[in-house]
Amino acid sequence: MKIRKIIFIAVLLLVVIVCGVIGYMSLLNVGFVDALYMTVITITTVGYKEVAVMNNAAKIFSIAIIFSGLAVVGYGLSAVAATFFEGRFRNAWRTKRMETKISMLKNHYIVCGAGEIGYTVIKCFLESNLDFVVIENHPERVADLKKEGVLTVLGDATHEDALEEARIKRAQGVVCTLSNDADNVFTVLTAKQMNEKVYIVSKAIEKNAHAKLLKAGADKTISPNEIGGQRMAALIIRPSVISFLDVITQAGEVTLDLEEIVISPRSELAGQMLRDAKIPERTGLIILALESPGDPNIRFNPKSSELLKGEDTMVVLGTQEQIQKLRELACK
């Protein structure tokens, strides 16, 4: 219940008491304490004996005090009850709605841990409009994420039940950002056993953690400390290159982005040479690389004679609007 409402109810009750004291002092010709006593027993309707002989005016005044007091007290109790039950109902409804959404997820991502790095991942996923669910074992963080509308499971990501609740068997990717390597290794191992096809990226803290995580089943490992150090060094050694990278990773207000687009076998692009597809002319995108399934070599700066095939992946640079145009062409 808001503090303003509490103050309002208290003021109303105080007004009734003050009016009652003044009224009884005038009508019954009694002192302050007796008048206050009469006011309190009248408002609470406890039924004790009056302190003086009640005349008709005092009786009518008592009736008015009784109704006024009951109205104020009743309003206060109803406000407290409404706030309590409304809050519980709202939380129950929100939890049930979230559980329903999670149960319907498919080809989604799971973020294990909502610490500093995990929250950064969450923000990126929100900006990209991806379907994902977060597993976090701190109730305060879970409550904050739920307020932001983020699908969240309260639990330990190292346990199968939490991963099961996050629909690990239908997920296409897992991001492990737990606070220590042991928990990340155990989470990767458990997730891979429950869904061997899921793609897992894990945070690595210690230097020897990379090998353990890869052995447990992680597809990629990232060391925030190493990346941070490399970036700081690069800012000194190659500041112009880093400025360019900031542009293509949407730093500041720039809208350029790197994206990968998979060509559908049914697309009009499949079977065409790159020069005939005229992707830059039709979309405004820059094609940086091509990758074919089963071919470990990525063709950077592909030639115009490259043949586009179904299931090929194009790495492009451009705005989200331009990327959406290519995505539509690649899916037709």
Image (spheres, rainbow, N blue to C red):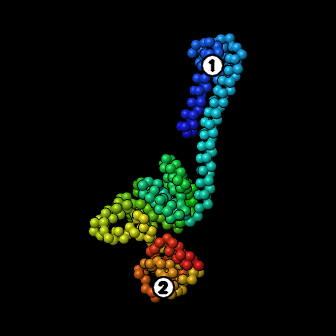
Q: Is residue 141 above or below residue 103?
A: above
Q: Position of residue 170 (x, y in %)?
A: 57, 64
Residue furthest to the left in view is: 237
Of residues 203 and 15, which is closer to you in this image?
15
Secondary element under disc 2, as helix, strand or loop, is: helix
Q: Amino acid at mark 1?
A: Gly
Of residues 257 and 138, which is closer to you in this image?
257
Give the CA separation, mark 2 to mark 1: 95 Å
Residue displayed at 60% across by 12% down: 30
The image quadrant where one finds the N terminus is top right
Q: Position of residue 17 (x, y in %)?
A: 60, 23
Q: Is residue 327 above or below residue 67?
A: below
**Label 2, on which residue?**
274
**Visible residue check, residue 302:** yes
Q: Nearer the viewer, mark 2 or mark 1?
A: 1
Residue displayed at 31% across by 63% down: 232
Of residues 107 and 10, which is closer to you in this image?
10
Residue displayed at 52% across by 86% down: 272
Q: In the rendering, which numbered label is found on residue 66?
A: none
Q: Residues within 10 Å of mark 2 (few under 14, many from 20)?
A: some
Q: In the rendering, which numbered label is found on residue 23?
A: 1
Q: Amino acid at mark 2?
A: Leu
Q: Determine which quarter of the picture holds residue 317.
A: bottom left
**Visible residue check, residue 193:** no
Q: Position of residue 271 (x, y in %)?
A: 54, 86
Residue displayed at 43% across by 86% down: 303
Residue furthest to the right in view is: 56
Q: Earlier in the sequence, mark 2 or mark 1?
A: 1
Q: From the viewer's perspective, tell me whether residue 236 is left or right of residue 183.
A: left
Q: From the viewer's perspective, tell me whether residue 46 is left or right of residue 157.
A: right
